[in-house]
Amino acid sequence: MKQKMRICPGCGAEAPDGKTAFCHYCGRELVDLSRENTDKKIQGVKRVQSETMSVPKKIGWTAVVTLLILFLLFGLAVFFDIPGKMRESGMQRGMDRLSRNMQESYEKEEWDKLEQYLIDECEVYLDSPDYFLYRTAWFLHIYPPLFDEAHRSHDAEEMLFIYEIMAKDYDMRADDVFFSVYVTDEEIEAALASEVERETQIMTEEGLEDEMYKLRR
């Protein structure tokens, strides 16, 4: 096999490849001018150039793929109404919280706190389907004793005032839509019907029948 030679760029003398890095004659650094070495250099340059050229393409493809994924996700979100469902879920959590507040107050018989929810914060708590259930429960706790006290003191105006509150609460149940929108409790519903019937009988006995029925028109 023919030994590769390196050519001195200074004096042009040849030196066996790999034997020395410098020319024996002039001391200049030897350069490998063989075809094989030249081809390697050229391939190296081409490889680096190719890799450099491919970087923008890779970035471009990454951007395209990212945008495509985002577009598909947006399309799926719209198709399945994900934002709407998230809003509904948030609203449901809010209503559940309102219901829990009223339920806890009712079960612990914390009537002042229940009054706060039902009266002072009614605009908020009306969003709960349990609102009228607990408002009726609160009415039944507050008004029957006041009605009886007004009856004993022959305070017809107060009796009519309380009766109107209880009767109108009861009359709301005549609309079938009420039961499709709001939650009810059989025990509370029965207690309300019984109380309105009791007050109606007392009002009739007191001769307040005409005034009583005017309130319910």
Image (cartoon, grey):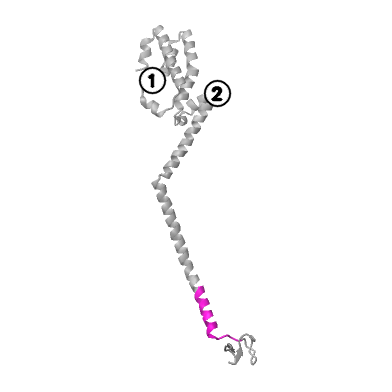
- 203 or 180: which is nearer to us? 180
- 120 or 107: which is nearer to us? 107
Q: Residue at x 48, y 35 (%)?
A: 94
**129 over 157 or under it: above or below:** below
- Residue positioned most to the left: 217
Residue 141 placement (x, y as % from top left): 50, 18
**160 over 85 or under it: above or below:** above
Q: Residue at x 48, y 21 (%)?
A: 137
Residue at numbered disc 2 = 110
Query: How many other residues sit within 10 Å of disc 1, few (<14), some (14-19) or many (≥20)?
Result: few
Identity of the amino acid at label 1?
A: Asp
Residue 81 placement (x, y as % from top left): 40, 44
Quarter placement of the C terminus: top left
- Residue positioned most to the front: 1
Identity of the amino acid at label 2?
A: Glu
What is the secondary structure assignment of the residue under circle 2?
loop
Can residue 112 be seen? no
| Magenta residue span | 30-48
Residue 175 placement (x, y as % from top left): 36, 24
Residue 88 placement (x, y as % from top left): 44, 39
31 inside magenta stretch: yes
What is the secondary structure assignment of the residue under circle 1?
helix
Q: Residue at x 47, y 63 (%)?
A: 59
Checking the image for residue 171, the label placed there is 1
Q: Residue at x 46, y 39 (%)?
A: 89
52 inside magenta stretch: no
Query: How many other residues sit within 10 Å of disc 2, few (<14), some (14-19) or many (≥20)?
Result: few
Q: Name the magenta segment's main secondary structure.
A: helix
Write down the quadrant of residue 173 in the picture: top left
* Separation (CA) of disc 2 from disc 1: 27 Å
**If you read the primary sequence from the N terminus, does the residue marked by circle 2 or circle 1 appear first?**
2
